[in-house]
């Protein structure tokens, strides 16, 4: 969707991150609006457009109850996607933003789903529950402790360090805002609890929440930040058939 923000056109994309919990962990859903201002026509420069840093607004935060079977969980994820699409179609981000050149395709979110520990079967359940045509892309994700990303059999294997660093950079640059939602304070607490440690065995850098604390919300947000910072590059590679 293209919008006018402070007199400039902007591309607006929706990114939804889902961290699937196991028996003792919550499933978390984060919905983020990604805004990238476009150069004015008189200043148009392709390199400038590519290098323009996006900003983000966290617009949706939800934890699903513990002990719920994956089928109703995936039904709720599909429902959330439709709810977020309806919000975006109304262009209600802020009074300063007006919809221009409405493009329905831009209201279709990118949906990232972490399937570590739950298996591909849960992703298949989600595909049954959701209208895939309502999405830009469904992106299954598995996170590892290394430093490189790879793409195999339709699954993105992401570096946890790179994911968390993406959020740290966006937050440190003051490029992310948070709507006041019922779970915003819990998300902030999880962000504060994240710590960087050196593994005693491998001597590698590890980033994790404090012992006994949940990190599902911040993990889902890290996926959104990671993808948002790379959206143009990944979309271009997908068009070329590289992803």
Image: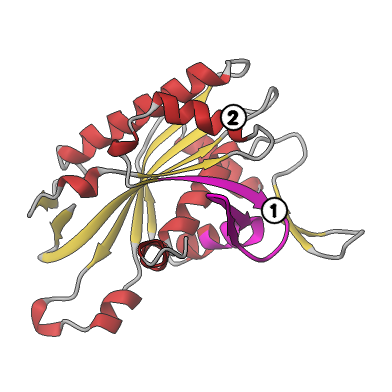
Q: In the rendered image, which residue does mark 2 sit on?
A: 121
Left or right relative to 157: residue 3: left
Instruction: Please identify the quarter of the rendering in which residue 66 is found.
Output: top right
**Neighbour tally class for label 2: few under 14, some 14-19, many 20 plus, Cα within 10 Å:** few
Query: Mark 1 highlights which residue?
Result: 144
Q: Nearer the viewer, residue 27 or 197?
A: 27
Q: Which residues are magenta?
A: 138-166
Report the residue at 66% width, 46% height from top. Answer: 193
Q: Nearer the viewer, residue 142 or 89?
A: 142
What x and y, as percent, mark residue 98?
10, 50
Residue 230 occupies quadrant:
bottom left
Residue 174 visible in image? no
Residue situated in front as seen by the camera: 20 or 238 = 238
Residue at image position (72%, 61%) is: 146
Name the residue: 46% across, 62% down: 170
User: Can residue 124 be seen in this snapshot?
Assistant: yes
Residue 49's mark? none
Please report the residue visible at 75 percent of the width from the left and 34 percent of the height from the top.
212
Q: Position of residue 225 (x, y in %)?
A: 47, 55
Callout 1 crowding tier (Cα within 10 Å): few <14, some 14–19, many ≥20? some
Q: Horizontally, is 234 left or right of 67 in the view?
A: left
């Amino acid at each position: 969707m293209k919008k006018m923000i402070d007199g400039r056109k902007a591309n607006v994309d929706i990114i939804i991150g889902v961290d699937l919990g196991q028996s003792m962990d919550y499933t978390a859903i984060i919905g983020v609006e990604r805004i990238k201002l476009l150069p004015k026509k008189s200043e148009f420069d392709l390199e400038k457009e590519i290098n323009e840093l996006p900003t983000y607004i966290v617009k949706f935060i939800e934890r699903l109850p513990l002990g719920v079977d994956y089928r109703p969980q995936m039904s709720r994820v599909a429902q959330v996607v439709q709810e977020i699409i309806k919000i975006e179609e109304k262009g209600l981000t802020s009074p300063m933003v007006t919809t221009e050149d409405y493009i329905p395709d831009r209201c279709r979110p990118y949906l990232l789903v972490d399937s570590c520990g739950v298996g591909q079967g849960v992703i298949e359940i989600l595909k049954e529950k959701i209208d895939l045509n309502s999405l830009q892309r469904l992106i299954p994700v598995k996170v590892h402790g290394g430093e490189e990303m790879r793409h195999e059999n339709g699954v993105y294997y992401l570096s946890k360090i790179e994911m968390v660093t993406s959020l740290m950079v966006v937050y440190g640059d003051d490029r992310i805002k948070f709507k006041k939602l019922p779970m915003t304070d819990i998300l902030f607490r999880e962000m504060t609890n994240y710590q960087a440690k050196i593994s005693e065995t491998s001597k590698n850098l590890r980033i994790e929440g404090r012992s006994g604390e949940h990190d599902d919300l911040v993990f889902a947000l890290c996926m959104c930040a990671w993808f948002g910072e790379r959206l143009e590059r990944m979309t271009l590679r997908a068009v070329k058939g590289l992803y």
